[in-house]
Image (cartoon, grey):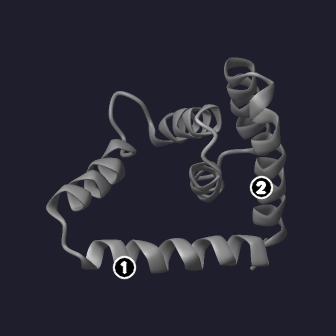
Amino acid sequence: MSDLVKEFDDYRAKMNDKILADNNKIIKRIFNLDTNAYTDGALDVKTKELLGLVASAVLRCDDCVKYHLETSYKIGLKKEEVVEALSIATLVGGTIVIPHLRRAYEFWDALEANN
């Protein structure tokens, strides 16, 4: 596994475990809501992941972008679909999104390098 992907996954898992171990009801409910929001509904999972990716890029949350990229990759979205979503994010968010776009491309390349 690419170091970039492994480091992200390991850190995220470690810190999520630590956060959830505090047993805070509000935080647990937010985590649960986040998980359930991305299940099939009126919109399919792939569409919801792309929406999450666009929102994350516009909000300039690199961890969120990485999470949605990895999930998008795992559920079978093609690079062309992801890039098109990222292009919308860049259009909506403006040029300030470009550094996050660079890191998104780097992370997608790392995901592809794992296979």
In the image, residue 50 sits, relative to residue 35, either above or below, namely above
Q: Please state the horizontal and vertical placement of residue 33, each as a whole percent of the image.
A: 27, 48
Q: Name the N-terminal-most of marks 2 and 1.
A: 1
Determine whether the residue tagged by mark 2 lies in a helix, strand or loop. helix
Contact between labelled residues 1 and 2, with CB atoms less than 8 Å apart: no
Residue that extends furthest to the left in the rendered view of this protein = 25
- State the CA–CA distance, disc 2 to disc 1: 27 Å
Q: To which quarter of the image does residue 10 belong?
A: bottom right
Q: Is residue 80 left or right of residue 69?
A: right
Q: Is residue 21 left or right of residue 69?
A: left
Q: What crowding class fits label 1: few (fewer than 14 Cα within 10 Å), some (14-19), or many (20 or more)?
A: few
Q: Which residue is mark 2?
A: 108
Viewport quadrant of the C terminus: bottom right
Q: Is residue 109 left or right of residue 65?
A: right
Residue at image coords 34%, 72% = 19
In the image, residue 113 sits, relative to residue 64, either above or below, namely below
Name the one closer to the observer, 86 or 48: 86
Residue at image coords 36%, 41% = 40
In the image, residue 106 sits, relative to residue 91, either above or below, namely below
Q: Which residue is mark 1?
A: 18
Looking at the picture, which amino acid does disc 1 mark? Lys
Q: Please state the horizontal and vertical placement of residue 107, each as a whole percent of the image.
A: 77, 58
Q: To which quarter of the image does residue 101 belong?
A: top right
Q: To which quarter of the image does residue 15 belong?
A: bottom left
Q: What crowding class fits label 2: few (fewer than 14 Cα within 10 Å), some (14-19), or many (20 or more)?
A: some
Viewport quadrant of the N terminus: bottom right
Determine whether the residue tagged by mark 1 lies in a helix, strand or loop. helix
Residue at image coords 55%, 33% = 55
Q: Please state the horizontal and vertical placement of residue 90, each as a whole percent of the image.
A: 75, 26
Q: Please state the horizontal and vertical placement of residue 42, each as a whole percent of the image.
A: 34, 27
In the image, residue 17 sits, relative to residue 92, either above or below, namely below
Residue at image coords 33%, 35% = 41
